Image (cartoon, rainbow, N blue to C red):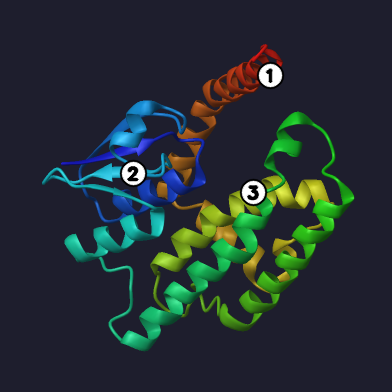
Amino acid sequence: MIILHGFAASNYYNLVKHVLLYKEIPFQENLIYSTSDKLLTISPAGKVPAITTANGHHISESSVICDFIEEAYPAKPLYPAEAGERATVRQIMKIAELYLELPSRRLIRYALSGTAAPEALQDEVRQVLNRGIGAMQRLCQFSPWIAGKQLTMADIYVYYVNTIVDSFASSQLNWDILDEIPGMKEWHNSMSKSAIAKSVDADRAANMPEFMKYVKEQIAQAKTERNSPP
């Protein structure tokens, strides 16, 4: 049985969890946070999520985990059969990650602390987001799924990318980013109504108080270490 390591407040953890649930693959969850020394034994960069396979292999990085799951458990495929169409799905996933999720992530610390990000940082993030918006406008089909007629890995991946974009970048920049991509908000709302998304989102909400307590403890510890004499 697969073991999924991480925590439900993480969007990357949740997208892997969604894939496992969609494919009806048995798995166990192991609650572990990013700074845990134990995590380094299963995730070389100390990032979540990570999985331990039934054969004892440790795999990290969400896109790599998704590809492993697809190859090891081909039932209910999430990639098209044709190579070019598979590449398009992966292209959408990569662009969403690089040009929407990662720049939005730079604003999380300010959103969580209730402060505004510096204007220079806001300008940098806007520039990258504009590039991502343009690319997604050209790539996404929403007919009815993000890459065409078939539900693919890109639908699950982008849905959880959007949770970061909408929660942090939109609020910090006072900008409805998802609305800039025609069809994105309607598609996202449709995805959110699935039984799997509702279950995953409920687990996320349940984990959030503990995660926020953990974040505050880490901030307090960092302040203490900075103020300690050498």
Q: Is residue 146 visible?
A: no
Instruction: Give the Cα separation between the discs numbered 2 and 3.
Output: 19 Å
Instruction: Give the Cα separation between the discs numbered 1 and 2.
Output: 29 Å
Question: In the figure, 209 relative to 42: above or below?
Answer: above
The residue to which callout 2 is attached is: 50
- Determine the residue positioned at 71% across, 66% down: 128
Residue 44 percent coordinates (x, y): 35, 44
- Determine the residue positioned at 29% across, 35% down: 41
Screen quadrant of the N terminus: top left
Decide which of 31, 188 is in the foreground and name it.
31
Neighbourhood count class around disc 2 (C-alpha, 10 Å): few under 14, some 14–19, many 20 upward: many
Dot 3 or dot 1, earlier in sequence: 3
Residue 167 percent coordinates (x, y): 68, 45
The disc label shown at residue 105, or none: 3
Dot 1 or dot 2, earlier in sequence: 2
- Find the residue positioned furthest to the left: 55
